[in-house]
Image: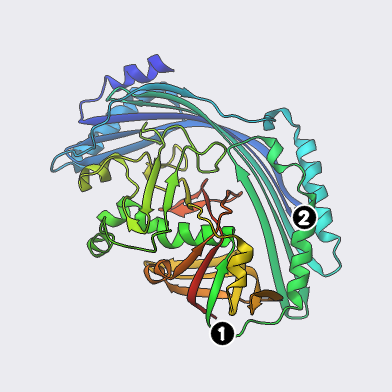
Amino acid sequence: METLLKKALQVADVDYLQIIVEKRRQTQIDYAGPQLEEIGTTTERGGNVRACHRGGWGFVSFTDLSDLKRYVREACRQAKMVGKKQTALSPFRGKAAAIHPQFEIDPQTISLEEKEHLLRKYNQIILSSPKVQTSRVRYKDLRIDQYIATSDGSFIHQEKLYTGALLRATAKDGSNVQQVFESVGQTKGFEIVKGLEEKAEQVAKEAVDLLSAPKVTPGLYTVILDPKLAGVFTHEAFGHLSEADFLSENPSFKERMKLGERFGPDELSIVDDGTIPGGNGSYGFDEEGVPAQKTYLIKEGILVGRLHSRETAAQMGEEPTGNARALSYLFPPIVRMSNTFIEPRDYELERMISEVEDGIYAVDMLGGNTDLEMFTFSSQKAYRIVKGKIKGMVRDVILSGNVFDTLKKIDAIGNDLSLFGGLGGCGKGRQFPLPVSDGSPHLRIKEVLIG
């Protein structure tokens, strides 16, 4: 493969050229209620050529390696048609490397029948609850064998392995419908989807419990977010604003996200780190051949960094961070998060709760959206906090506000960081679901609008 790709690179007559070749093998199993809707394994092979000349980009994807030089010429032709100025890519010394996944149980050694049997058991546990109307249980493993060759000397061979499962229960009582789900996903093997029986029982029980929970009373509350919900908030409400391709296209936000400005209390540090072993968003090299790394976005309350490709780093006079990622060979890389989280501090959850006179403990993520700096998130479940004690469960808890104001209202950060992947992933630019992880310790935030 190395000889083939390096010979194809020699055909190029542009400022920069990159070739990616992938082999992808994926197994999916999907139960909807008692019905097995999908089961099977697919294998595909393809790649892309990406050329840059005078600032213009050409991109060609393919599934047949036999005519690789023609794809190179076509990508170069496209780039020359578009290019009108000067190519600006952050300088990078190419390297040769090989990356292999670490796991206990290779999913490819587990038969399709055994995988289905395990999923069926989880599904039956969920459906055994009388008030559970339906379920959704999914499994996926994806193995990617990827080669990256660039005109500036990189030749990367990396294997990636993603394994995950989703367990969801929907309970119904008349017109009252509630759902709870759990999802696991890591760059590990089949071991991470074994032993989920208790999680299956938990999602069924909590969906049923929500049927009798009262609706929350709207208002301003001191809110404690659990690590899952706080992690999603960090990713969705702040992380996307730190992606430099977004900032380069939005001058007003580029000015708003000025390095050196205070964005939160001294205790607040937000990190994106693609090097965490087993993280669902971890990888050796991004799709430009730049090594994954740890990047501080906020450090001790101050905005200190953002996420870059080589192009955005050159545009903003900064260093590439190894965050140019693509969903597959069908797409060019764009700036994406990896594993994004808030660093832990010293607060214990019990102390955090005991200091709240009247508040909400919001747990896990059900849904939500962001619109620039404004956000709306709904928690799967929540509990009232009264005079420092957790009281009964409440439902229909929707948190909304401005991310910049909300970060400054964080007044306690826990010591219990957890990082969560999942069967899904992050969506951006029609590329979904890209594997990521997000996480946080417990957070306490003052004056959050609950609806």
Position in image of residue 265 (x %, y %) = 39, 63
> Spatial distance from mark 1 to mark 2, Cα to Cα?
31 Å
Q: Quadrant of the N terminus?
A: top left
Q: Is residue 15 visible?
A: yes
Position in image of residue 33 (x %, y %) = 77, 59
Asked where in the image residue 216 lies, by quadrant, the reply is: bottom right
According to the image, label 2 marks what residue?
Answer: 200
Front residue of 8/121: it is: 121
Residue placed at 74% from the left, 31% from the top? 110
- Nearer the observer: mark 1 or 2; the answer is 1
Front residue of 359/439: it is: 359
Q: Give above or below for 196 relative to 112.
A: below
Residue placed at 47% from the left, 31% from the top? 46
Amino acid on which disc 1 is placed? Pro
Q: Give above or below for 134 relative to 5.
A: below
Position in image of residue 95 (x %, y %) = 34, 22
Q: Is residue 35 visible?
A: no
Q: Give above or below for 200 relative to 133.
A: above
According to the image, label 1 marks what residue?
Answer: 218
Q: Residue furthest top?
A: 3
Protein image colouring: rainbow
Q: Decide which of tag 1 and tag 2 comes sooner along the chain.
A: 2
The residue carrying pointer 2 sits among few (fewer than 14), some (14 to 19) or many (20 or more) residues within 10 Å by Cα, namely many
Residue placed at 75% from the left, 54% from the top? 199
Which secondary structure lies at badge 1?
Answer: loop
Front residue of 447/232: it is: 447
Which secondary structure lies at badge 2?
Answer: helix
